[in-house]
Every structure is written in structure tokens, then in C-alpha cells.
Amino acid sequence: MTVPMLQRLRTDESGVAVLELALAAPILALFIMGTADVGSAFSRKVALEQGAQRAVEKVMQTTELEKVQETIAREVAIQAEVAENRVQVEFPRYCDERKMPDVERDENGFAEGADCGAGETEAHYILVSVSDEYKPMFPALGMGKKLANGNYLVVAQAGMRTK
């Protein structure tokens, strides 16, 4: 009696789809959650970049009384919705591809220094770097190196040539 019952169970295929779904559903759910988290982190990085770029463009058109560096840092913080201490503003100067050391800055904060060599093209830039912490929606999923508080560091950069 038990042998025919075991043979019948071995050939019975009812419920196989439910079992396959039960095995595949957790993997599919993890994939969807990971995609949502990565998309959200990327969205935050793009928002930081756009905030930095908008601030640089705005300041270059409107700065009158304050130093450019302070104005840019404040505007980036407002546009990107971060604290002002998370914004770094640099004014590098290049002679062709060679970065020149800053000797002194003019009243607007731009780098002034030794002249470029004969035939070299001088270029001045404003480079803005802004960082923020991203808290994942699903912290159990690893997306890279975590900070001590469990969040991830997101860094965005924007720049503009000024001369």
C-alpha cells in the first residue's frame, strides 16, 4: 500500500509552481529592493550635482559684495539642501595641463601666481565638491563601504572655467 502511494506522489506535479515561486520570490524581492536603493542613492547624487552647478552659475552672475568662495558655499548648501560645512570650493589654476600652486588670491578669491611659460595657455576654474550622507531604505542590503552610523557617503562635483 505504501509503495503505490510513493510512486503516485513522485509523479504528481500539482503544487510545483507554488514551490518554485516560494524559492524565487525572496531572490526577486532582494533584487527589487536593491534596485530601489541604488536608484534612490543615484538620485541624491544627481540632486547634489545639480545644486552645485546651479549655485556656481547663479553666483557667477550675481555676486557683488561678498567673496565668491563664501557665496558659492552658501548657495550650494541652499540648493543641495546640505550644511555649509559639507561644501568645498576650490579655484585651481592651470598652465596647459599642469596645475599651478596658489601663491595668493585676489579680492574675489581667485588664484594668482607665477606666470605660465611661453606658449602655455592659462586657465582658471571654480570647482565645487559637495557631500552628503545617504540612508538606505533597506539597510540589510550592502551597497559598498558604510560609515560608522550605517549611512553611505555620496559626493558630487561641479565646475566651471572662469578664465
Image: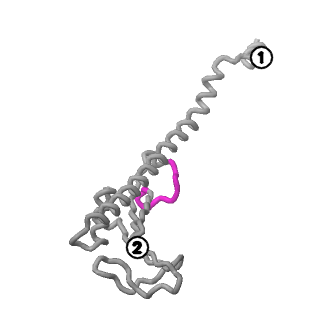
Instruction: Classify residue 19 as left or right of residue 139.
Output: right
Task: State the predominant SS element of the stretch in magenta.
Answer: loop
The colour mode here is one colour
Counting from the top left corner in percent of width and height, residue 49 is at 41, 57
Image point 59% across, 29% down: which residue? 22
Q: Secondary structure at mark 2?
A: loop
Q: Report which residue position mark 2 lands on.
A: 163
Quadrant assignment, res 91: bottom left
Q: Which mark is residue 34?
A: none
Q: Looking at this view, is 72 or 13 the one in front? A: 72
Counting from the top left corner in percent of width and height, residue 19 is at 62, 26
Q: Residues within 10 Å of mark 2 (few under 14, many from 20)?
A: few
Image quarter where the C terminus lies is bottom left
Q: Looking at this view, is 149 or 56 the one in front? A: 56
Measure the alpha-carbon separation of dots 1 and 2: 84 Å
Report if residue 150 lies within the magenta region: yes
Image point 66% across, 22% down: which residue? 16
Q: Which residues are magenta?
A: 141-151
Quadrant assignment, res 60: bottom left
Instruction: Classify residue 16 as left or right of residue 90.
Output: right
Please, is residue 151 above or below residue 36 in the view? below
For discs 1 and 2, the disc positioned in front in the rendered view: 2
Q: Check the image and name the residue furthest to the left.
A: 65
Counting from the top left corner in percent of width and height, residue 103 is at 39, 86
Q: Which mark is residue 7?
A: 1
Amino acid found under the numbered disc labelled 2 = Lys
Amino acid found under the numbered disc labelled 1 = Gln
